[in-house]
Image (spheres, grey):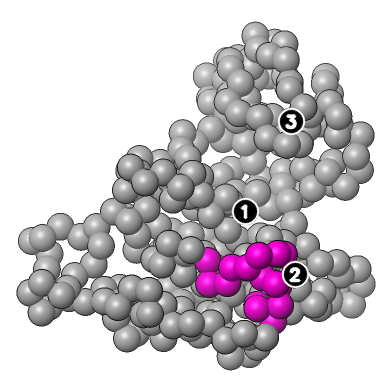
């Protein structure tokens, strides 16, 4: 539903609305600036036709809660959740960027391939920070990573995030939530999830960053979910023959069906990513990494 640009010029909780950035199915995003210190923010607001839906309000509030408390350079910082003076909205720092999904879809945009490993590490380190607080994101995918033109990446959208401490394991009602192309098998089955579910989703996203498509596709949602549950993932080397043995193995481990067979935490993933390049250089017989200058080879 179209949102008239009636809020532009008004002041919401100390921030003057400067312009409308984009509109999605359920939310609209505005750019704002603080009246006094000129700090730039993004204002995410529910659209009128869903403004009273309790689940969407809870999700927006959850985004604000986690992004306000998880202080890390790889996470867009939240500045608060508000009910007034208009519809429920969440204010966060403004980060001029595009989603990884938008950059992957644009054939002329080489940002992801140019800064491939740098982006992987930034998102991985942000996830490690999330997990250090016993929080699981539960919706890692290209839409929820934003990247600027310099290759700096940040994690967003904690609408489905939850804690995975012992209290949560015992009392939180579990539901199937996530995005089908990136969901871990235990998440699809609505079982208790922990940091290893995020590692699976991160592995699926990394697979797509390199291969150009998710590890599992299908004609229907049910087929994609079935393949996540029961079909072995094809080695990423089948799609990019020059990936190193180490990287090929890491992706396969992250996408293991059983959580126990995946890396135990993101620190282990980061350590492997840092240990060497992602690709063999077929031209000179050596090893080169995408985005690394020639003098470093």
Is 143 on the left-hand or right-hand side of 269?
right
Residue at 76%, 36% in the rendered image = 26
**Residue reaching furthest bottom?**
261
Q: Image quarter for residue 182?
A: bottom right
The residue indicated by pointer 1 is 70
Q: Which callout, 1 or 3, points at the residue further toward the start of the chain?
A: 3
Does residue 69 sit above or below 139 in this rendering?
A: above
**Is there a contact, CB below 8 Å, between mark 3 and mark 2?**
no
Residue at 68%, 19% in the rendered image = 14
Q: Residues within 10 Å of mark 3 (few under 14, many from 20)?
A: many
Q: Quadrant of the N terminus?
A: top right
Residue at 84%, 41% in the rendered image = 57
SS assignment at label 2: helix
Does residue 19 sit above or below 295 in this rendering?
A: above
Q: Is residue 221 magenta?
A: yes
Tag nearer the camera, 1 or 2:
2
The residue indicated by pointer 3 is 45
Q: Which stretch is magenta?
A: 214-229
Q: Which callout, 1 or 2, points at the residue further toward the start of the chain?
A: 1
Tag nearer the camera, 3 or 2:
2
Q: Nearer the viewer, residue 57 or 282?
A: 282
Mark 1 and mark 3: Cα distance apart in space: 21 Å
Q: Nearer the viewer, residue 76 or 238?
A: 238
Q: Residues within 10 Å of mark 2 (few under 14, many from 20)?
A: few
Residue at 12%, 64% in the rendered image = 296
Is 6 on the left-hand or right-hand side of 295?
right
The residue indicated by pointer 2 is 222
Does residue 15 sit above or below 260 in this rendering?
A: above
């Amino acid at each position: 539903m179209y949102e008239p640009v009636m809020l532009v010029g008004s002041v919401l909780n100390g921030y003057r609305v400067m312009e409308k950035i984009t509109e999605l199915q359920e939310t609209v995003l505005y750019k704002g600036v603080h009246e006094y210190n000129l700090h730039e923010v993004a204002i995410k607001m529910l659209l009128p036709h869903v403004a009273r839906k309790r689940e969407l309000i809870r999700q927006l509030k959850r985004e604000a809660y986690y992004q306000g408390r998880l202080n890390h350079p790889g996470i867009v910082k939240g500045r608060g959740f508000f009910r007034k003076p208009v519809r429920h909205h969440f204010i966060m720092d403004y980060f001029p960027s595009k989603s990884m999904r938008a950059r992957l879809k644009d054939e002329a945009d080489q940002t992801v391939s140019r800064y491939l490993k740098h982006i992987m590490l930034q998102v991985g380190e942000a996830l490690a920070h999330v997990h250090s607080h016993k929080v699981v994101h539960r919706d890692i995918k290209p839409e929820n990573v934003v990247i600027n033109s310099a290759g700096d990446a940040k994690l967003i959208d904690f609408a489905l995030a939850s804690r995975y401490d012992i209290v949560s394991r015992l009392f939180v009602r579990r539901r199937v939530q996530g995005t089908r192309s990136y969901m871990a098998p235990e998440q699809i089955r609505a079982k208790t999830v922990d940091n290893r579910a995020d590692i699976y989703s991160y592995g699926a996203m990394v697979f797509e960053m390199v291969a150009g498509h998710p590890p599992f596709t299908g004609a229907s949602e049910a087929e994609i979910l079935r393949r996540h549950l029961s079909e072995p993932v094809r080695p990423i080397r089948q799609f990019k023959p020059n990936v190193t043995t180490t990287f090929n193995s890491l992706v396969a481990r992250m996408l293991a069906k059983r959580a126990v067979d995946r890396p135990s935490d993101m620190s282990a993933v980061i350590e492997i990513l840092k240990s060497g390049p992602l690709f063999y250089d077929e031209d000179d017989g050596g090893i080169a990494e995408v985005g690394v200058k020639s003098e470093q080879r």
